[in-house]
């Protein structure tokens, strides 16, 4: 079965601390994985995708096929990173989203 | 041009009433998705339209839910005989097409409709 698991509903850190938002997936095949983000009062939007191997707003995510994980990381959190983060797996022409993790960054 | 729009932004209804939620996708986008966003459930896929193909309705939670996409553009999600558990934010997203070069394209989301069933 295709599934995305985000074990943490809420992650709270202080500004400047490292952040890791966990995402594990279940998929038989070569997965495509994404992180979407929703800031307060804004629309859900794409943050990054594993294919691009890019760093967006200081965030990176590495696909680990052995551990079936796609954790989102940032070495130094900023207050403006506070948002809801969703990990997503490509299914058949649609995305399968996790339940999301709310990141709170305190000053 | 303008992004995905949804109306109404908020809808309060009484249990048992029918509601219609509207989505205007980005012009030229061939694929349209409906999701339900609720606390603890994350983002649940409801239905997917791609061009003139039969829609993928595999995510609709019950036969009280239905959706149409007229003329390959505007979509309406209808919930009949609403129940309190239908209260959620309903999101619409569109893509120019599902894939390009074998890779899945970015979904562009609307602002959502917050449905409250009393």
Image (cartoon, coloured by chain):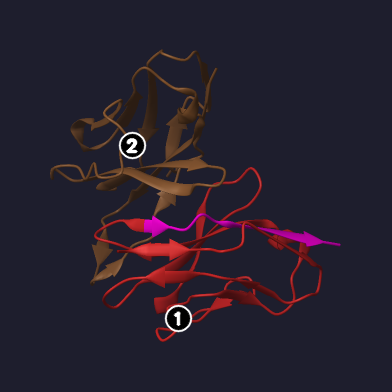
Chain colours: A red, B brown
The structure residue drawn at horizontal position 26% and vertical position 56%, both measured from the top left corner, is B97
Residue B87 is at least partly visible in this image: yes
Q: Residue furthest left?
A: B53
Q: Which element carries disc 1, helix, strand or loop?
A: loop
Question: Which residue is more in the foreground, A32 or B32?
Answer: A32
Residue B31 locus on image (x, y percent): 27, 48
Question: Which residue is more in the foreground, A24 or B115?
Answer: A24
The structure residue drawn at horizontal position 18% and vertical position 45%, both measured from the top left corner, is B51
Height in image: A15 above or below B19?
below
Label 2: few (<14), some or many (≥20) within 10 Å? Answer: few
Stretch in magenta: A96-107
Residue behind mark 2: B61
Tell me: A50 left or right of A77.
left
Which of the 4 quarters of the picture holds residue A81? bottom right
Residue behind mark 1: A63
Residue A80 locus on image (x, y percent): 73, 60
Q: Residue furthest bottom?
A: A66
Residue A88 is at least partly visible in this image: no
Residue A52 locus on image (x, y percent): 43, 78
Label 1: few (<14), some or many (≥20) within 10 Å? Answer: many
């Amino acid at each position: 079965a295709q599934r995305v698991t985000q074990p943490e509903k809420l992650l709270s850190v202080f500004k400047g601390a490292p952040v890791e938002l966990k995402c594990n997936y279940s998929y038989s095949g070569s997965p495509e994985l994404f992180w979407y983000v929703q800031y307060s009062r804004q629309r859900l939007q794409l943050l990054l995708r594993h294919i691009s191997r890019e760093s967006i707003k200081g965030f990176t995510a590495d696909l680990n096929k052995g551990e079936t994980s796609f954790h989102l990381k940032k070495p130094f959190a900023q207050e403006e990173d506070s948002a809801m983060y969703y990990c997503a797996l490509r299914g058949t022409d649609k995305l399968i989203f996790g339940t999301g993790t709310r990141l709170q960054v305190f000053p | 041009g303008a992004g995905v729009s949804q109306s109404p932004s908020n809808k309060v209804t009484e249990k048992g009433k029918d509601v219609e939620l509207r989505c205007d996708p980005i012009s030229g986008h061939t694929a349209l998705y409906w999701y339900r966003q609720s606390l603890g459930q994350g983002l649940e896929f409801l239905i997917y339209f791609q061009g003139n193909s039969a829609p993928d309705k595999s995510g609709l939670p019950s036969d009280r839910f239905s959706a149409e996409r007229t003329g390959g553009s505007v979509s309406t999600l209808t919930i009949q005989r609403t129940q309190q558990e239908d209260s959620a934010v309903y999101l619409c997203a569109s893509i120019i097409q599902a894939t390009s070069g074998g890779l899945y394209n970015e979904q562009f989301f609307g602002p959502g409709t917050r449905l409250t069933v009393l």
